[in-house]
Image: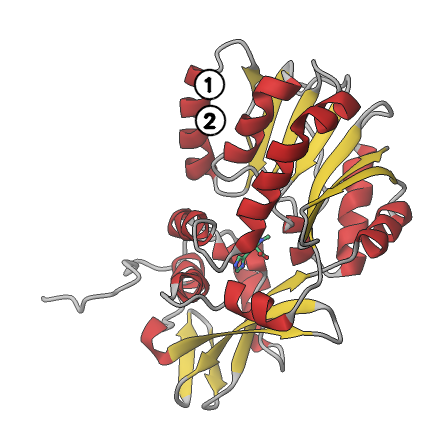
């Protein structure tokens, strides 16, 4: 028998665990269909996100890097050396690694949901910095998390760059930051990157780039969902939509059905009308003051903020 070509590469049913499958199906069946942004990151999704960070339109990565370059010494003075540096959503670990010479952490703990991608990155990094103890953890940070005993309790500094905090709704961000604070053991802190509200045209371009990398990143989520749930999304039937919602101060990403269609999965299906959308991600934009207020609601005290000249991005330090 000649099997049809399946662009997702999955012909043998769901690979996700029960809870994952149930969560995804509930989101797809909601009146306004939605999926968690965590499903943007399978192995290919993580690589596409790396490519996004190189795009001229996607200013956050290079702007944050410029802030670290300009203010690294000041940041290091505030944090001190010999910390336990815990990198939340570490990805390729490049941002933390750029700070190693200044921060000289005693232990580096990169955490990411994308296990294989993380293991490869940490393997390479450990060779470059053999004197720093490294403990990689594959954890889903979207729920409660606890750090294993292998992570030193002293001077835990949580590093959360890239404005990943923006992918939580504000009330979720507060809950997440509270959980982070509970894991600091009293004498630690938080170094966090926060994207700032700005001209809508700049934001729209950053999330809908000219060569379509962000579109591929968004559409790849459907392949990942096919893999996890056994669904039969046809990526070609969907298009990427992203825009700044000024009222909510957030970028919204959606996938829009190009035509009326039905998606099936083992035990269920969902019909989509032409133009109907799946809401795949929000990316909230703050001001330094609004974010300091959010930190305070989580029990942190913001004690330093560094920004670029245009005021597009902020790096903030907060004490637990
Ligand atoms: C990871 N996160 C901070 C990115 C953002 O800007 O919200 C994810 C992203 N989505 C589209 N482009 C980048």
Determine whether the beta carbon of the residue marked 1 sits less than 8 angstroms from the nearest atom of ligand 1.
no
Residue that protrudes farthest toward the top in the picture: 131
Residue at point 73%, 61% (across, down): 169
Colouring scheme applied when the structure was drawn: secondary structure
> Residue lying farthest left?
1
Q: Is residue 303 visible?
A: yes
Q: Quadrant of the C terminus?
A: top right
- Do the residues under discs 2 and 1 have CB atoms within 8 angstroms? yes
178 sits to left or right of 279 = right
Disc 1, SS: helix
Q: Quadrant of residue 135?
A: top right
Relative side of 237 to 1, left or right: right
Taking the image in four quarters, ligand 1 sits in the one at bottom right
Residue position marked by numbered label 1 in the rendering: 126
Residue 225 picture location, percent across and down:
44, 62
137 or 128, which is in the foreground?
A: 128
Residue in front for this viewpoint, 21 or 32:
32
How many numbered circles are shown?
A: 2
Disc 2 crowd rating (10 Å Cα; few below 14, some 14-19, many 20+) is many
Which element type, helix, strand or loop, lies under badge 2? Answer: helix
User: What residue sits 44% from the left and 83% below the top?
Assistant: 257
Q: Dividing the image into 4 quarters, which one contains the N terminus?
A: bottom left
Q: Is residue 148 visible?
A: no
Q: Residue at x 28, y 61 (%)?
A: 11
Q: Assess mark 2: CB under 8 A from ligand 1?
A: no
Residue 59, image x, y percentages? 55, 54
Residue occupied by mark 2: 122
Q: Is residue 294 left or right of residue 7?
A: right
């Amino acid at each position: 028998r000649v099997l049809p070509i399946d662009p997702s590469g999955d012909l043998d049913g769901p690979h996700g665990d029960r809870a994952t499958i149930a969560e995804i199906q509930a989101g797809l069946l909601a009146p306004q269909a939605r999926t968690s942004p965590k499903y943007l990151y399978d192995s290919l999704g993580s690589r596409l996100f790396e490519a996004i960070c190189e795009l001229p339109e996607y200013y956050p990565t290079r702007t944050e890097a410029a802030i670290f370059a300009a203010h690294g010494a000041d940041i290091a003075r505030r944090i001190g050396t010999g910390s336990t540096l815990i990198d939340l959503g570490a990805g390729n670990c490049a941002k933390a690694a750029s700070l190693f010479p200044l921060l000289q952490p005693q232990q580096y703990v990169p955490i990411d949901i994308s296990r294989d991608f993380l293991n490869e990155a940490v393997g390479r990094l450990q060779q470059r910095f053999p004197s720093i103890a490294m403990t990689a953890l594959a954890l889903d940070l979207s729920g409660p998390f606890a750090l294993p005993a292998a992570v030193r309790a002293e001077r835990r500094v949580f590093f959360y760059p890239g404005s990943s905090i923006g992918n939580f709704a504000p009330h979720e961000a507060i809950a997440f930051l509270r959980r982070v604070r509970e894991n600091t053991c009293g004498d630690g802190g938080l170094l966090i990157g926060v994207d700032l509200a700005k001209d809508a045209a700049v934001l729209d371009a950053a999330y809908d780039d000219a060569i379509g990398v962000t579109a591929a990143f968004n559409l790849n989520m459907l392949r990942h969902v096919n893999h996890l749930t056994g669904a039969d999304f046809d990526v070609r039937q969907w298009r990427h939509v992203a825009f700044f919602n000024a009222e909510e101060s957030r970028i919204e990403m959606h996938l829009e059905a190009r035509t009326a269609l039905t998606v099936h999965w083992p035990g269920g299906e969902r019909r989509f009308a032409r133009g109907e959308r799946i809401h795949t991600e929000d990316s909230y934009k703050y001001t330094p003051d609004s974010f300091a207020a959010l930190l305070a609601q989580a029990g942190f005290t913001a004690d330093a903020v560094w920004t670029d000249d245009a005021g597009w991005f902020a790096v903030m330090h907060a004490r637990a």
